[in-house]
Amino acid sequence: MKHLYASLTEYERTAVDYQTFCSRITHNKIVALKGASSPVLIGQGLGLRFNSSIGLNSTVAFTDELAKIIAISKHPNRPHTMMDLSTVRSSIPLHIEIQNRLGCPVGTIPYYICFDPQRGIDDNELLETIEEQAQNGVAFMTLHLTANLDLAKKSLVRNIPIISRGGSLLLRDMQINKRKDNILITNLDRIVRILKEYNVVVSIGTTFRPSTQYDALDATHLGELNMQIELSEYLKNLGLQVIMEGIGHISFHRIPEYCSILRERNYIPFMPLGPIVSDHTHGQDHITSSVGAAYLASLGGADIINSVTREEHTGGIPTVRSILEAIDAANAVIQIVNDSRFPSHFCKGNIRHHNCMGIPEEVGCTRCNEECPFIWNEQNQTKLPSTQKYL
């Protein structure tokens, strides 16, 4: 436990003492994701983290996706975790490349590569894939345990019934193989044994997250949220570490209502998808998502957010440039929220710059030239007694 506590930042250790930290780990209010380099902790009282995702949808795309991993590894704003959302197998899985090149915890959705449009998902193949990925060092797996027929029927009255790829694959498998419960539920005992053996965290996915802001907080959405909370308690009692996923689309003004419902019971580390706070920002979801994520996290409703690219709703595959753009947007949210969570560390008020760029160069730049306000600062601030500076 001490090595996990030592991995926190100085300002997190100032905000959460060791005893409190141990208690929150024990009660799953803080979760440790194993990484090839070091663990990443998410949860109550800690700084906000962010995740970035890539994935193969054809074997010929391997070089392109690998280029994204390499670009991310060289980028100054690196994600705390990454997900490999591949829907096809490759000789070297992307989650291994991520671990080797970034060293951060990696997540997967294992049945993405098990689904066949004609045969659905084979039980043995699913379990073998979960164990193989766990052996490969995957830190967390998203499982859409809430994919069931009752909620699916309720969702049909929505503007868009479901938008979750993982959840829809499980529902399609239920139809193909005439299952009463989804394949994860029927094999849950065996899945739990594998995940416990390899210390893999369960991320309870959201099948019925709202696809439009007008479907948010409807009966289907709230029904699934309640089911997720119950499943998290069940899995925690089995000895697994658990996080939850949400939220999809929701109007900006309804985020406090959602956050209140989310946190009214026991604290579960939470990773939102978005929330995207408008249905009318096509091609700008890296912005819309950041706005929603910042608001939700500022209310205590998010522990790790997702970087969302501008292609989220365009149907296009994200480029290296848009992946990095989304990472920078998510990192900006991290800075905004952590400035608020740890004001004594980030808002000391003793930062002095020679220019508005915040770099130690001479006063002035090509924008303001001789009208630069830092000219006045330099001329007058040096005249103040040191005790009066930075008040």
Image (cartoon, rainbow, N blue to C red):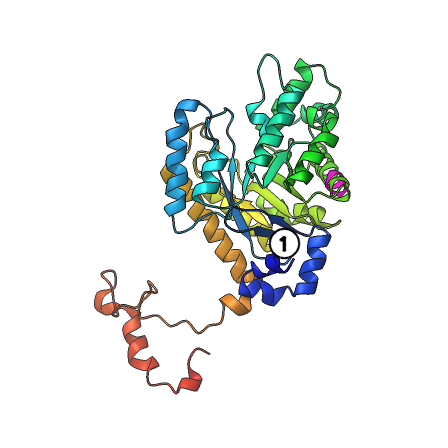
**Residue closest to the eye, 290 or 40:** 40
Along the horizontal axis of the image, is 200 left or right of 55? Answer: right
Decide: is 22 above or below 120. Answer: below
Along the horizontal axis of the image, is 327 left or right of 363? Answer: right
In the rendered image, residue 310, in percent from the top left (x then y), is placed at: 43, 37
In the rendered image, residue 142, in percent from the top left (x then y), is placed at: 61, 35
**Residue closest to the eye, 319 or 90:** 90
**Residue closest to the eye, 330 or 241:** 241
* Kind of residue at disc 1: Gly
Which residues lie in the magenta part? 229-233
Residue 249 seen in the figure: no
* Residue 70 position by quadrant: top left
**Residue closest to the eye, 98 or 336:** 98
Name the residue carrying label 1: 300
**Number of on-image labels:** 1
In the rendered image, residue 330, in percent from the top left (x then y), is placed at: 48, 48
In magenta stretch: residue 45:
no
Residue 63 seen in the figure: yes
